[in-house]
Amino acid sequence: MFKWEAVPVRGMVTQLPCIPTGCSACCRETTMPVTEAEAKRLSRRTGMQLDSFTWENNGILTLLNDEKTRACVFLLTASSDVNAEGVCSVYEVRPEGCRKYPIVLNPKDEAILDEGCPHRENFPEPSESDAIELLNLEERLLRKQ
Ligand code: SF4
Ligand code: SF4
């Protein structure tokens, strides 16, 4: 999938597993929330109306899945198989939740690696600053910013 990034970890560069493994699991049957600002940016970039790529999930804008592929409407993929490859067509402007994943908050607001990521053991352990970034994102989502 899209999300390969080389990230510095303790002075070394770590290659995340997304592209080397061809994974796009987290873009399938997505429930990824999007802030209002992110949705407007995606709309400007793609020329798509908001309601063609988002829906309101308990008042929070959320990325839509394509009916055929059952994946995020922005995932370029030929298959609905969760193990099939796919590429994010809006990689440069993808929402922050997509950028942070597989780091998520647990019920205690601690940053953890989500069990839904099949390669989570190949990611660096989340830090306190990850938790703060996700809490800030949560606040912007609730405030509809
Ligand atoms: S599920 Fe995990 S390994 Fe797969 S693309 Fe998403 S973050 Fe990368
Ligand atoms: S915006 Fe891109 S990274 Fe985020 S779920 Fe959709 S395809 Fe995946």
Image (spheres, rainbow, N blue to C red):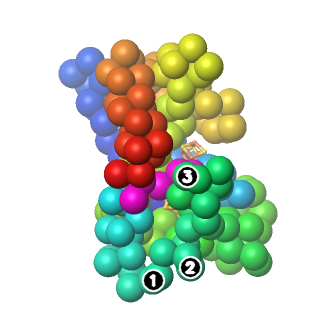
- The location of residue 19, given as percent across then percent down, is 49, 53
Residue at 38% in and 85% down: 47
As shown in the figure, which amino acid type bears the numbered disc 2?
A: Ser
Identify the residue position indicated by label 3 in the image.
60
In the rendering, which numbered label is found on residue 52? 2
**Disc 3 to disc 1, how far (Cα)?**
19 Å
Q: Which residues are magenta?
A: 32-36
- The location of residue 80, given as percent across then percent down, is 76, 68
Most foreground residue, 144 or 26: 144
- The location of residue 51, given as percent across then percent down, is 55, 76
Q: Residues within 10 Å of mark 1 (few under 14, many from 20)?
A: few
**Disc 2 to disc 1, how far (Cα)?**
6 Å
Residue 92 higher or lower than 136, as above or below: below
Q: Is residue 35 magenta?
A: yes
Mark 3 vs mark 2: in front: 3
Check mark 1 vs ligand 2: CB closer than 8 Å? yes or no: no
In the rendering, which numbered label is found on residue 96? none
| Residue 4 visible in the shown view | no
Image position of 54 (left or right of 5) = right
Residue at 58% in and 53% down: 59
Which residue extends farthest bottom?
A: 47
Identify the residue position indicated by label 1 in the image.
48
As shown in the figure, which amino acid type bears the numbered disc 3?
A: Ile
As shown in the figure, which amino acid type bears the numbered disc 1?
A: Met
Figure quadrant of residue 7: top left
Residue 31 higher or lower than 120, as above or below: below
Q: Secondary structure at mark 1?
A: loop
Circles 2, 1 touching at the beta carbon (< 8 Å): yes
Q: Is residue 93 magenta?
A: no
Which residue extends farthest left?
A: 11
Image position of 119 (left or right of 12) = right
